[in-house]
Image: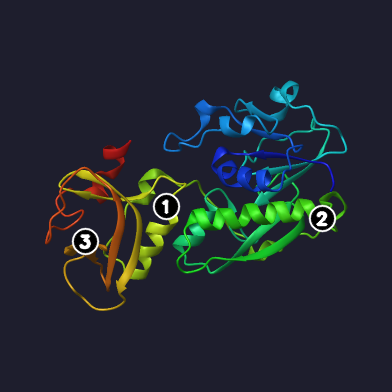
């Protein structure tokens, strides 16, 4: 196997490190961000793996500012997974490959996983590509399709992506791959996902609501709605009735052991996992009494 190093956010390391551990690939250097830079809603602890892996925690910055903490030989291939896309500069002395959890040139930029779930993408993939002056526009070294099944959530997709990262570094020398230019006419770029983008609009159809819940679910910050002024995070759900009008959008129709059935603009969904501290009652309407779509920025800023 070629010599590799991995730069990854802790979000991806949560799924990647167990795979590397099972394969006993303890000699791969791991770089991540310091704990204070991790998202606050993540509880993954690197301590359990530091006894086995050489894990270096870095401050946020460019390579030239941090190079004294990064000791890689010039024959190393560095894999950047969910990493700052402006990190590298001309002082880097190793071969660098970025990974995008999508089939480039589509879904460039940040938030590619959430965006694909929101759009209901079934055939996604992984792209290994070279850094460039334009975000995610560098030459492609290797791609592979990854299916997003209907019941998959981002956690499931990330596990598949991490599995393909492992498979690739075990079987392919990326530094020797033929390079292919991206087709610019197929490209589009994404802006950063903001927390307020996660509010659920029950006025859409059941499938759209389901995809929205999936797209913002773990390891991200969770889709949400309001109940009597309280912010309710919805982690999981499923479509129940695909078409038809069964009540006002957001109206709670039924509460059972399976979850809370809610009317959508067309069809219904069942909310199967919620994070809340209030007693939810039938016939109440989510988002009804707080003009959330007008005041959202103030409420959660």
- For the point 69% across and 52% down, the residue is 165
Cα separation, mark 1 vs mark 3, equals: 18 Å
Q: Is residue 43 visible?
A: yes
Tag of residue 216: 1
**Front position among marks 1 and 2:** 2
- For the point 68% across and 61% down, the residue is 184
Residue 216 lies, with reference to residue 65, above or below; the image says below
Task: Say whether marks 1 and 2 touch (CB < 8 Å).
Answer: no
Q: Provide the residue designation for mark 3.
A: 250
Q: Quadrant of residue 238?
A: bottom left
Task: Give the secondary structure at mark 2.
Answer: loop
> With 220 as the anchor, is 145 left or right in this view?
right
What is the residue that sits farthest to the bottom in this orientation? 244
**Front position among marks 2 and 3:** 2
- For the point 52% across and 29% down, the residue is 37
> With 203 as the anchor, is 99 left or right in this view?
right
- For the point 72% across and 35% down, the residue is 88
Q: Quadrant of residue 186?
A: bottom right
Q: Quadrant of residue 112?
A: bottom right
Question: Which callout, 2 or 3, points at the residue further toward the start of the chain?
Answer: 2
Q: Is residue 104 visible?
A: no
Q: Provide the residue designation for mark 2.
A: 172
Residue 242 lies, with reference to residue 196, above or below; the image says below
């Amino acid at each position: 196997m070629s010599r590799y190093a991995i730069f990854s956010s802790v979000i991806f390391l949560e799924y990647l490190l167990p795979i590397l551990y099972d394969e006993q690939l303890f000699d791969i250097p791991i770089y991540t961000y310091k704990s204070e830079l991790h998202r606050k809603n993540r509880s993954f602890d690197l301590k359990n793996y530091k006894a086995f892996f050489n894990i270096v925690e870095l401050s946020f910055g460019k390579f030239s500012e941090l190079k004294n903490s990064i000791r890689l030989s010039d024959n190393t291939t560095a894999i950047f997974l969910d990493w700052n896309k402006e990190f590298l500069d001309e002082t880097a002395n190793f071969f660098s490959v970025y990974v995008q959890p999508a089939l480039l040139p589509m879904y460039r930029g940040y938030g590619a996983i959430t965006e694909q779930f929101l759009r209901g993408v079934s055939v996604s993939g992984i792209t290994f590509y070279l850094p460039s002056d334009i975000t995610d526009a560098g030459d492609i070294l290797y791609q592979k399709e990854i299916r997003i099944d209907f019941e998959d959530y981002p956690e499931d997709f990330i596990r598949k992506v991490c599995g393909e990262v492992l498979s690739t570094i075990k079987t392919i020398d990326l530094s020797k791959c033929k390079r292919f230019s991206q087709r610019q006419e197929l490209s589009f770029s994404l802006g950063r996902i903001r927390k307020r983008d996660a509010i659920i609009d029950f006025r859409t159809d059941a499938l759209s609501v389901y995809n929205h819940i999936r797209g913002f679910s773990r390891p991200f910050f969770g889709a949400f709605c309001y109940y009597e002024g309280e912010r309710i995070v919805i982690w999981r759900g499923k479509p129940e009735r695909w078409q038809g009008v069964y009540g006002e959008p957001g109206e709670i129709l039924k509460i059972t052991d399976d979850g809370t059935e809610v009317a959508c603009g067309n069809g219904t969904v069942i909310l199967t996992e919620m994070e809340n501290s209030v007693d939810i009652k039938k016939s109440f309407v989510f988002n009804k009494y707080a003009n959330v779509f007008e005041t959202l920025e103030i409420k959660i800023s």
